[in-house]
Image (cartoon, rainbow, N blue to C red):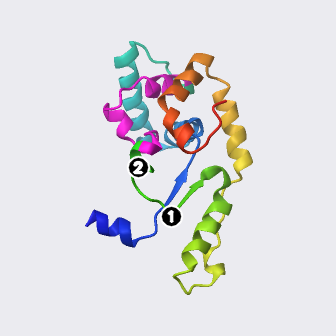
Amino acid sequence: MREELLRSYRKVMLARRPDHRLVSTFRDKLEHRTGQERVDFHAYLSWKIKEKFGYVSAQLTFQDFVSYIVQQGEQEEVLLDPHWRSLYQMCNPCVINYDFIGKFECLAEDVSYAFKMMKEEDDKEEDDFLFSSRAPATTQSLAHTYLSQLTPHQRLDILSKYLLDYLIFDYSLL
């Protein structure tokens, strides 16, 4: 069944810089959540960080979060979360023959291109595929602010953990 789906459907994948994915996850899961969901996730991560390192800040920092994520083994439960799991592991781009692989950094253009590509087999008007996204410049600027809080060693740890994602999806290693 899976093989039939992979043969008969168009396959589109969107990649995102690994370090920017970590910033986005931290902001989404720990800064912008409200209510019980944020409390639960914060408590869970704080407990796991304390268990691993023997300490945790009163307010979970981006540095704490990154340290915890990059020091996880490949089979540890936390890495199964799709927000920070390696894209090459999650989406198998070396095994699955994707019709199109786009990048989050140029999301609007890539989604538009993917829809135009799919339109070959569809009668919908191009206007049916209008797409709006956050400005990549804003996202990149926010990522820079968070990543500047990290030590050079932590930046290297991110690079090491996600090296195949950087290479496969042609992201700068700097």
Residue in view at x 69 percent, y 31 percent:
145
Q: Give whichever of 22, 64 is nearer the camera.
A: 22
Residue in view at x 52 percent, y 32 percent:
163
Q: Are marks 2 and 1 in contact (CB under 8 Å)?
A: no
> Which stretch appears magenta?
63-88
Residue in view at x 35 percent, y 26 percent:
73
Residue 132 at what x, y percent from top left? 66, 64
Which quadrant of the view contains residue 52? top left
Quarter occupied by the N terminus: bottom left
Above or below residue 8? Residue 171 is above
- Based on the picture, tell me whether residue 96 belongs to the magenta stretch: no
Left/right placement of residue 137 relative to residue 17 reads: right
Residue 89 at what x, y percent from top left? 40, 43
Residue in view at x 59 percent, y 24 percent:
155
Q: Give whichever of 149, 73 is nearer the camera.
A: 73
Above or below residue 173? Residue 104 is below
Q: Give whichever of 87, 46 is nearer the camera.
A: 87
Q: In the rendered structure, find residue 99 and report the number of the disc placed on it.
A: 1
The mark that comes first in sequence, 2 or 1, is 2
Residue 161 at what x, y percent from top left? 48, 29
